[in-house]
Amino acid sequence: MSTAKEQNRLLRGPRSALERARQDPATWADLAYCAQVTDEGPMEDRNRAARFAVLWALQYDRRPKDLPLLRFLLQQQTTYYREAVPWGMAPDLTLAGFLVAEHQQVEDLWLHWDAKNISFDTALGYHLYHLLTAGIAAATEMVQASSHPDRDRILGDIRSARHTDAAVAEWLDQQRTRFPSDPADEGLKSWAYHAARLGEREASRLFMIEWAAGEPRTDNTLNTLQFHLAHLGYLAEAVEVQKEAVAISDASWSGARVSTLLTLARLQRRTDDYAGAWQTLQEAQRSLPPDKHGLDQGIWRHFVKECFLLVPIAPDDSTGHRLLAASEQDLHGIPRLWMDGVLDAAIAAAEHIGDQPALHRYRAQQQAAACERDQGVGQSRHSASGPAPS
């Protein structure tokens, strides 16, 4: 099926959902944040896909009367990120914020401030200019007249640099380019991400493959493609893409090559391909730097962690025990074992094959590593505080 037909099909549902929301505000309840605990543990939002569908349709059909709906969607996105997203920020939050900001109503400043202050990542990624599209003077006046607990912080942010209304207008134009009003102006990679948010795995796969076909086969292109395919669950295809990435990797930079190989091994492990993953790890080991204490110590931790993670899919107990022993030998001499989850993987591997002595050793190492971490944090705080006044 052509991408054009898939795009038209994909938009039918969101457009119908938008019309339903416009005609009956009572249906907005189906777009509100709704916490759902998954089998894997993390919190999810039952209505996230439905909410994004309406938000996406609004990007292509902007009307002044939709501002109350847009405000509601931004509030729900903010709640979703606060409750279910511990780190990071995706364009779904930025799109909701932009569509509200584009109406340039000064009273929406507080909605934007809430969105900006969800987490460390949103504080950096959600631009201050969302708050200023009604004009810097109007925003400053509103904040000054308020009794909001963050009043001084907001004023400080506004005054911390020489912001101008012209700069805000330029930023707003940039956002209009980033979120075009015409679907034909949307790139295939964006279509792939949008389809994934709607749960349309096959359409998302089609768009991303089509995007990659028009790009140079560079590390960045292949990494984007394999990561997206793996995220969608197309692991066998992701493995093939990563093999291509290994083939073009720069052998002169061992750290980059090892990282590429470890990604391949991880994908092979997820497809239960023990033989393939083990062969890849052996190739990675030949490229590892000899110094475990140097700048590449993180590569060593990730390598050994991947070896431990492979133990549970070993074809038999004897192979599992040999791999566990080899992994423990490679673990010796690696510093900062409290990082990267390497000892968690070791403990899980020992538990899987029932090796109690190894399990005891790894737990003891984990306790020692935790003490080392706490001592390091304490020393850093002491150094930062400086000497006590005399």
Image (cartoon, helix red, strand yellow):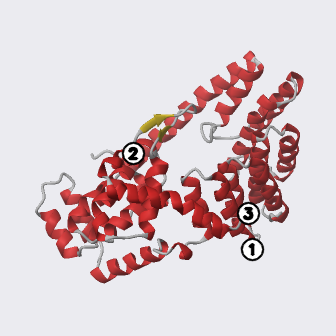
Front residue (pair 177, 305): 177
Q: Residue at label 3?
A: 222
Q: Which mark is residue 30?
A: 2
Residue 389, compared with residue 228, is above or below; it is: above
User: Mark 2 against mark 3, which lies toward the viewer?
Assistant: 2
Residue lying furthest bottom in this view?
Answer: 166
Residue 116, can we see it? no
Cα distance in 3D space between marks 2 and 3 = 38 Å
Front residue (pair 275, 105): 105
Residue 281 falls in image quadrant: top right
Dot 1 or dot 3, earlier in sequence: 1
Cα distance in 3D space between marks 2 and 1 = 42 Å
Front residue (pair 206, 385): 206
Q: At 18% from the left edge and 51% from the top edge, which residue is drawn? A: 149
Q: At 17% from the left edge and 63% from the top edge, which residue is drawn? A: 143
Q: Position of residue 269 (x, y in %)?
A: 78, 40
Dot 2 or dot 3, earlier in sequence: 2
Residue 309, can we see it? yes
Dot 2 or dot 1, earlier in sequence: 2
Q: Which mark is residue 216?
A: 1
Q: At 24% from the left edge and 64% from the top edge, which residue is drawn? A: 156
Q: At 85% from the left edge and 41% from the top edge, which residue is drawn? A: 278
Which SS class for mark 1?
A: loop
Which SS class for mark 2?
A: helix
Q: Quadrant of the N terminus?
A: bottom right
Which SS class for mark 3?
A: helix
